[in-house]
Image: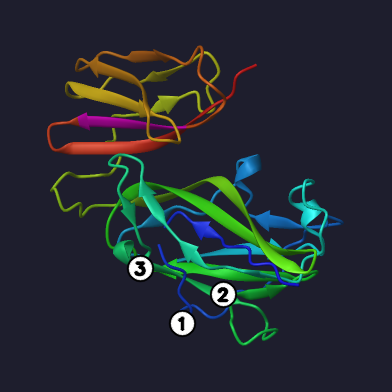
Amino acid sequence: MRILLQFSIVLGLLIVSPASFGQCEPDFDFGEAEWGASPDASVGEQFDTAYVAQPYFDVFHVLVPTDASAIDPAFALPLDSVVLVSTTLIDTITMQTLSLEDVGLEIICNNMGSSPNACTLLAGAQYCASLEGVPTGPGVYQLSLDVQAYVTVFGIPVAQPYVFSGYIMDIVGEGNPDGILEQQPEAISWFPNPAEDSFRLNPMSSDASIDVRDMSGRIVRQVNTLAQNATVISTQGWSSGIYFVTWTSNAERFTTKMVVRQN
């Protein structure tokens, strides 16, 4: 029996190649858990911020369970293995789908030699995959993990999809093809973050427009601001979660994450 967990980290194709920074080590402490992932977006964990033209390296750890019910109680079937298959990036502003190569990154699996395919991970053990490269352009991207588990039902392999969502990939720096500078202007700050009922944008040096999008890319608030005026944006009625706040003025644009926690 075989299970393929297809992790589509919302950046493009999962690539297996020699590691530029050395192989990652599957050494995360999951304690007594049957299975787990790190970073774990469900508890607010994210990959480190990347910077244009600067070498980047972060690690995704996964503890593969021995039974599918550890991931989804609806499937009480034993697991044989997990395969990390592909990755995809979605630009939170344009909603364009990109590959890792498009932004200068790749993912490299390490299964400790347990299978000829480095991205095949056997049940009951911990493995890792490194996210690395030299980013070529800025952006804020949704990074989701799409999972397809193959279990045996009456002797027949059956695929069951599953999605790990909520990952964000920030790439900060200059170099957008449209010529817009994507770095934080010194005059701008946003607080509190996390926000409950509202958050405040400090006075700015020029008139600007503010767009707030949820994780699906849907605009939940648009505001025009005037130079030197502080702006308060209400979050009442919003669901708890991650939002993207984009400030645009003249030839400058900056996007940041805003966490909303409703009581």
Q: Are marks 2 and 3 in contact (CB under 8 Å)?
A: no
How many labels, in total? 3
Task: Look at 54% across and 69% down and name the residue there.
Answer: 130
Tell me the element at label 1. loop
Closer-to-camera residue (109/25) = 109
Toward which corner of the image does residue 224 lie, by quadrant? top left
Residue 85 in sight in this render: yes
Name above or below for residue 123 compared with residue 72.
Answer: below
Q: Which residue is mark 1?
A: 17
Disc number for residue 134: 3
| Span colored in magenta | 243-248
Identify the image quadrant of the N terminus.
bottom right
Task: Look at 52% across and 22% down and name the residue there.
Answer: 195
Name above or below for residue 261 compared with residue 15.
Answer: above
Tell me the element at label 3. loop
Name above or below for residue 247 compared with residue 148.
Answer: above
Identify the image quadrant of the C terminus.
top right
Q: Position of residue 100 (x, y in %)?
A: 38, 64
**Separation of disc 1 and disc 3 at Cα?**
15 Å
Task: Look at 20% across and 15% down and name the residue there.
Answer: 226
Farthest right residue? 32
Q: Which residue is mark 2?
A: 109
**Separation of disc 2 and disc 1 at Cα?**
8 Å
Q: Is residue 39 magenta?
A: no
Mark 1 crowdedness (10 Å alpha carbons): few <14, some 14-19, many ≥20: few
Q: Position of residue 257 (x, y in %)?
A: 44, 36
Mark 1 vs mark 3: in front = 1
Toward which corner of the image does residue 119 lie, by quadrant? bottom right
